Amino acid sequence: MPRDLEILFSGKGFTERHGCALPLITIDAGGYPRAPLLSFGEVRAHSGKRLSVAVRTRSHTAANLIRRPQAMLYYIGRRFCVFVQARAGHGRSCDCDPERQIFPLSVFRVKVDRAATREGPVEILTGPLFSAAQPDGIFSQPLFDELGKSRAS
């Protein structure tokens, strides 16, 4: 994973209350992709090869990560998009929020997509964003701390 993105996922995005929504693509039982939007409070990097994510316990996302452990997390930046393909390990119950499960992700491929030189100075003006009236709802310090203690498999 690019070092800048690792730093962002390691805590910078959380401490800055970065409002970017991070789609986590999983595949459901019918073979269709699903894309819940996670916040920087629900994703944490342990290294360039290991992440942890928190998802709702009885969600399609949790079931999909158990059934098919492949996932793709992506980040849309101003001048590039990063697609992080990963394999999920065994999820566990979250100690600080019983409505969530924490899954370790092992990164196996990263693609950085930028505009070609011939396309000129192209920028993405906005991507999916969260606007929270109560930012603590998507930026829980106890949850982010617990994501930091997770072990990737």
Image (spheres, rainbow, N blue to C red):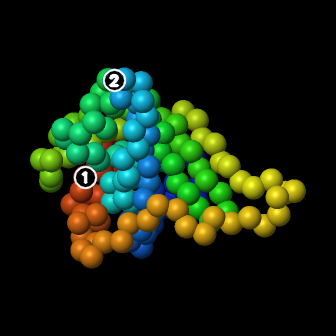
Residue occupying the point 21% across, 60% down: 142
Query: In this orientation, which residue lies closer to the viewer: 27 or 141?
Result: 27
Q: Answer with the quarter of the image where residue 13 lies.
A: bottom left
Q: Kindly identify the amino acid type of the residue bearing the numbered disc 2.
A: Ala
Q: Which residue is mark 2?
A: 29
Q: State the mark number for residue 146.
A: 1
Q: Of helix, strand and loop, which one carries label 2?
A: loop
Numbered mark located on residue 67 in the image: none
Where is residue 77 shown, x and y percent of the image? 59, 61
Q: Quadrant of the C terminus?
A: top left
- Please report the residue visible at 56 percent of the width from the left and 45 percent of the height from the top: 83
Considering every residue shown, the one lying at the far right of the view is 118
Mark 2 neighbour class, 10 Å CA radius: few under 14, some 14 to 19, many 20 or more = few
Q: Residue lying furthest left in this view? A: 98
Secondary element at image label 1: helix
Q: Position of residue 144 (x, y in %)?
A: 29, 58
Question: Can you tell which quarter of the image residue 90 is in?
Answer: top left
**In percent of the image, x 39 and y 60: which residue is there?**
40
Percent across and percent down for residue 74 are 51, 49
User: Which percent across, then down, holds residue 47?
Assistant: 48, 47
Q: Is residue 146 above or below residue 14?
A: above
Give how far apart the Cα atoms at labels 2 and 1 are: 29 Å
Location of residue 19 (image quadrant): bottom left
Q: Is residue 105 visible?
A: no
Which of marks 1 and 2 precedes in the sequence?
A: 2
- Type of amino acid under label 1: Glu
